[in-house]
Amino acid sequence: MAEGRCCHGHAAQTLSKMALGAARRCHARSRESSPGAVGGARAVAAVTREGGSPRLGPAVSPRPGARCHAMEERANLMNMMKLSIKILIQSALSLGRTLDSDFPPLQQFFVVLEHCLKHGLKVKKTFIGQNKSFFGPLELVEKLCPEASDIATSVKNLPELKTAIGRGRAWLYLALMQKKLADYLKVLLDHKHLLSEFYEPDALMMEEEGAVIVGLLVGLNVIDANLCLKGEDLDSQVGVIDFSLYLKETQDSDGKQDGGITAVLDQKHYVEELNRHLSCTVADLQNKIDCLEKTNSKLQEELAAATDRIGSLQEEQQQLKQQNELIRERSEKSVEVTKEDTKVELDTYKQSRQGLDEMYSDVWKQLKEEKKIRLELEKELELQIGMKTEMEIAMKLLEKDTHEKQDTLVALRQQLEEVKAINLQMFHKSQNAECSLQQKAEAISSFEGKTNEMMSSMKQMEERLQHAEKARQAAEERCNKMKQELAGRLDTCRQQMSQMDSKCSTLEKELKSEKEQRQTLQRELHQEKDATTLLKTELQQMEGLKKELRKLQDEKQQLEKVCEEQEQALQEMGLHLSQSKLKMEDIKEVNKALKGHTWLKDDEATHCKQCEKEFSISRRKHHCRNCGDIFCNTCSSNELALPSYPKPVRVCDTCHTLLLQRCSSNSS
């Protein structure tokens, strides 16, 4: 471990010497080219991380040919990388502690490294649009080096990261914390045939400068970094390249002659940047105000059209009422006709039943008579059997008589069986007649229930139509009131339109949503017209009445919901306008604060302004972003979102209390 630390220290010293020489050469070239180049280099250039790789470093005279241009860009990027690594190593060794994401030299290093990785990237066309991200080459490391799989999985599992640029930045943070950034990039450079899919042939990663930068990154293994990825917006983060950090070393070697000039230039550029930002926001607000006036006029026209459509809907409702009354009368007539038919059928059934009863009584009498005859015959047979012994002589005659009698008996039995079959048929017919009577009685009761239900449903529909008319009248009164209130608010807004802030973007989104709601209203109105035509065609059928009436109820509820949503949207517009006034007052106060306060130099402050403790290595200096004075860490540990900064920044305790009181007063 001791030998490794000595090797890392020796490498850091050699790298710092190389970077110092490159910085001096760049500084000499900038002085020889033009005397204003030094002031330009000291300016603070805000470069978005989503854009392409700009030309960094000192101004180089243009040469003919794209190859010379690419060579100049590679040389400038390599020099900037040497300087950033040298400053980072020296500042980290002087502090002697682990670095966090707020450390300025570390932020500058990541910005320069990102530009180096973006140099010469090919633009990939997708269905969404053009995509130019350096995360694609970094994903190859997982395939080439299995040790990098932990980094890839942790980056993919972060829910805050939504773009490829944010994932690439998180990958670089984790690789630096593992002290394997140089090893992973060296693996990529060893497989240039894979990098050719992502980079142009004259890109920095495809040339010798890429190998030089990987060798310089080995010295960063001396540094211990603790970077927190949670809570940071890596997708839309803005990197600031401060060239004054790179020129400090060259100024120390050449002497502290231009110290006062650089401080004045820094303050001047800081104020100019703020003024430019404010002027851009004012111009954007004016454009948005014009758009809002146009959209308000369109909304008024759409409201007038909606009132006309509501009137036409009322007329259609009256027509539907008349048609419903006609259908009711027709249904009552049909019910009376069915009642008369059922009465006639009952009379015919009673008559047929009486005839069947008479037939049944006649058959029953015949059966009784046949039973009596059978009994008499059986008696005669018994007498004949008893007299058989006495009348043996007349047996032959008697046998003939018996045969004849037996034939008559067989005929009588057949007649009995036929009578039984006729009785069964008559019994079944009587049962069927009773079943049909029961079914018809049930049908009559069901018809009466349906008629009662139809009458009750028609009464309910009339009541609901009356309620809907009352609700519509109330909604019209509310709309008129809101129009009057909007007219007054628009007059006040036109006077204070020049004071609106970035909250107008939210208003635009809400206006878009209102337009979409208007479009849905128009679609629903067309659907209502189609439904009315269907009602006209299907009103003749009794079963279709219920379904169509339900559709009308649903459409009325949707119209009421749309009216309520419009009222809520108008209320929200008023709230947003009041909030925009408060924001413009805050911007005015910030402008006043900028005019009144100045950015205090680091050399002028030796003690904390609040606790008056002397600054040292352990007690560092911190600027308050509101008043510009210098405080210690304990007196300026608060963070608040200011109008001139996109994210929460450091503020002293006094400014923190004042700003909180101001916010509470504005909210009340």
Image (spheres, rainbow, N blue to C red):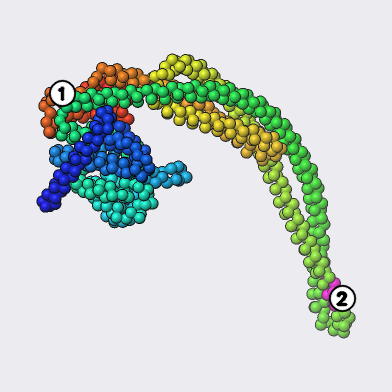
**Disc marking residue 404:** 2
Type of amino acid at the residue the image marks with label 1: Glu
Q: Specify the segment rendered in magenta.
A: 402-409
Residue in front for this viewpoint, 495 or 39: 39
**Residue at image coords 74%, 37%:** 334
Above or below, 335 against 588 in this view is below
The residue where tag 1 is placed is 604
**Residue at image coords 47%, 45%:** 127
Magenta region includes residue 484? no
Above or below, 441 against 523 in this view is below
Q: Is residue 366 left or right of residue 548?
A: right
Question: Helix or strand or loop: what does disc 1 sit on?
Answer: loop
Task: Tell me the mark number nearer the camera, choosing from 2 and 1.
Answer: 1
Indicate the position of residue 399 as horizontal and vertical percent values.
85, 80
Q: Residues within 10 Å of mark 2 (few under 14, many from 20)?
A: few
Upstream in the sequence, badge 2 or badge 1?
2
